Image (cartoon, grey):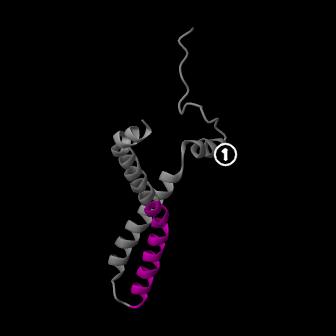
Amino acid sequence: MFILDTLLLSPLYATVWAARQIHNAIQQEREAEPAQITAELSELYMRLEAGQISEPEFAAREKELLDRLDQLQAEETGPGQRAAEKARRGKPANAPSKPRKSARK
């Protein structure tokens, strides 16, 4: 009976295994991306100092890289961290941004 169950469920097991492998590969890429961006920025600065690229080219590429780095850092910030940031600014985590008007008078 267990052999039959294993045979029938093997496509499901294979699909789950493949999904986990894809998930792990994506996680590894996302964890390595900030280091890659930092390395690209270093190379960009060296190319500017060596005169291989112009100042406008440098500024455009630097902006792209820094924007991507900021985006990655914003994605890492979860709801709990956003609440902590609001608390540091003096607002409770669940406080509305605008005061609500009372229906009673």
Q: Position of residue 46 (x, y in %)?
A: 44, 86
Q: Residue at x 44, y 70 (%)?
A: 37
Q: Foreground: 69 or 11?
A: 11
Q: Foreground: 49 or 19?
A: 19
Q: Which element type, helix, strand or loop, lies under badge 1?
A: helix
32 vs 12, left or right, is: right
Where 82 falls versus 32 (above or below)?
Answer: above
Q: Quadrant of the N terminus?
A: top left
Q: Residue at x 36, y 80 (%)?
A: 55
Q: Position of residue 105 (x, y in %)?
A: 57, 8
Where 51 falls versus 44 (above or below)?
Answer: below
The image quarter containing residue 61 is bottom left
Would residue 49 be counted in the magenta stretch?
Answer: yes
Pick out the residue farthest to the bottom: 50
Number of other residues with Cα within 10 Å of mark 1, as a class: few under 14, some 14 to 19, many 20 or more: few
Pick out the residue farthest to the top: 105
- Amino acid under disc 1: Arg
Would residue 82 be counted in the magenta stretch?
Answer: no
- The number of callouts visible is 1
Q: Residue at x 52, y 53 (%)?
A: 76
The image quarter containing residue 99 is top right
Q: Residue at x 37, y 77 (%)?
A: 58
Span of residues in magenta: 28-50
Q: Foreground: 88 or 23?
A: 23
- Magenta: predominant secondary structure element? helix
Q: Position of residue 47 (x, y in %)?
A: 39, 86
Q: Position of residue 31 (x, y in %)?
A: 49, 62
Read off the residue under disc 1. Answer: 88
